[in-house]
Image (cartoon, rainbow, N blue to C red):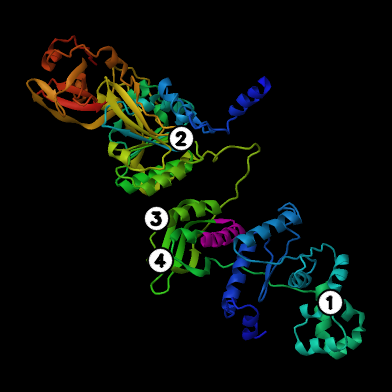
Amino acid sequence: MAGMSFSFAALLERPDIWRGGSLSRAGTPAVPSGFSRLDAELPGGGWPAGALTEILPAHEGIGELRLLGSALAALSNRGLRLAWIAPPHLPYAPALAAAEIDIGKIVIVRTATAKQTLWATEQALVSNACGAVLAWPKSVKYADLRRLQIAAEGGRASAFLFRSPEAAGESSPAPLRIALGTAAGGLAVRVLKRRGAPLARSILLPAMPPAVRGNRHVDRHSSAAAAARDFPARLVHA
Amino acid sequence: MAVSAALALAPQLRIAPRDPAAETEALLGVAGWAAQFTPGVALEFPDCVLLEISGSLKLFGGLEPLLERLRRGLMEMGWSTALAVAPTPRAAYWLALAGKGEFIGSTAELEPALATLPVEIFCRNDETLAALEAIGVRTLGELRALPREGVARRFGQGLLDEIDRGLGRLPDPRIFFVPPARFRATIELPAEITQAEALLFAARRLIVQLVGFLAARSSGVQRLVLRLGHRNRAATEIAIGLVAPSRDAEHFTLLLRERLSGLALAEPVRELGLQADDMVPLAGNNLGLLLEQGKPPGDWGHLIERLRARLGAEAVRGIAGRAEHRPERAGAIADLGVKQMQLDFGERPFWLLDRPKPLAEIDAVPHHDGRLELLVGPERIESGWWDGDEVARDYFVARTQNEALVWIYRERRGEGGWYLHGIFS
């Protein structure tokens, strides 16, 4: 009997057997996000390669890029290219370098229309010449998403699509969808969709710039003008 | 057999008039598809395509694998076929007509195999057939047992020559089929189709034909047009543009499925056509020595070229950091592959605004979507007095009412005031 239960356990360990309660492990390569609590909930243990990941931040400035920082750093240091398609602002080299991202591997693609954005994203995915493709499409329909998902499939690039929070209500062919919000001064990650059992609770991450985390309460109660006058300024004279 | 007699035997029979033009088109379609297996394709109207395969056996791994590919492809295109192999084209045609599925490799085996063929296979002259029947000759072997002079005198030299060509004793030159420059194929659907998805099955037949056609010319296509023919209105055309030239049947099918799934048919479809005009040379893929997973890595340079070709060179750039304290100059758009400096600054945002945005100041507190809370700072930056682009600013990390982190500064020159300069994403 003992032998039998042993073989049963061994059977369950097979990678091609999937149990309803567990996450899909089906050989999809993934890049660790750098946040162990998030990695534990992502199929494959990180951001999937060769698949579309939708990121829906509640609004900008809550840590939506910092969330990808570690993965982008790992990919670029492996020599892989990072394509940024139609970013809303200039990706700032000093901050990216500080996050250990090799900025020499970054290409910025600026587009004039939503159609161009989708086209450029598809090109970047189909070419299979990038480690990650980040895109900020203005409007994107289900059929477009499907095209992008097909373009991403079988490739090595992780495809990140930044969309508005309203998109959470629309259906999408992307295998991984993440909504971002804030909670208790940190980043609240809600996995809307993943391969595997759904995740009901949010994951709280300390996705804040380190200096801010350390100095959160410094001048909370002083007026801005006073702060500007009285704090010992870090002077820079060239 | 008369139609009435046939209907008496099988009342559910559907009668269709023979359409020679459609038959010829189908034969040409099969020939165009089969050209992927050999450059030597000849047509034997009305119902046979001859392939010269002795030069192709090695490439396709022998006779059986080649026949298997032929069978599968023809089946996928929806044809029922009889295959036969013989050392001479004529003998192969006869064996296929006889439907025996015989595959004869040597001339020595040919004679006994042909001896059992009925005379109707190679003789189409009714008078000759009647005469042969009258003297009790039913097979090729029996005919060849008769003295040649007598046969020549009685039935003409032509019949003997025909047999000699089949046996390879007389030359039998063929004109090889030249595939057309463009691909056009249509199929008439057995019943009108109202569901767009159901068209995929029929379209698949055309795709298989297209892929064979493309393989024959080592080409791919970047644009396909599927025509849906209706009874009373103009055809619906579905154009499919591809990112890169391809001749991958699975890929075409996938794209078509995608397009058809979102299509509402205005009227039932009676006829399906596929056309492709611009063939682009496409190299065959070299297979890796080891089994690799997924697609092979693509060419970075090609991607940049393609993006620049459509969006302009200025739209596809890199970024670079510089040893410079003024934030606008410390990080900016630059040429791709610029040598990068190692930089060490205070806390910097991932996004820098193209130009600083003035912020309202209420009760000496900067506002951006509500009151801003200063978290870190000030970091004073004074620089650039030597080139007339001087800055004198105190930078802060601030938090908005909805918990976003922003990078703002207080101008220390002139009118002063607060500005939003970056976002900590």
The residue under label 4 is B236
Q: Is residue B407 above or below residue B216?
A: above
B75 vs B166, left or right, is left
The residue under label 1 is B164
B418 vs A182, left or right, is left
Residue B302 appears anywhere in the view: no
Q: Position of residue B224 (x, y in %)?
A: 47, 60
Q: Are marks 3 and 2 on the same chain?
A: no
Quarter placement of the N terminus of chain A: top right
- Mark 4 and mark 1 in contact (Cβ < 8 Å)? no
Q: Are marks 4 and 2 on the same chain?
A: no
- Mark 2 and mark 3 in contact (Cβ < 8 Å)? no
The residue under label 2 is A195
SS state under label 1: helix
SS state under label 3: loop
Q: Are marks 3 and 4 on the same chain?
A: yes
Q: CA distance from mark 1 to mark 4?
A: 53 Å
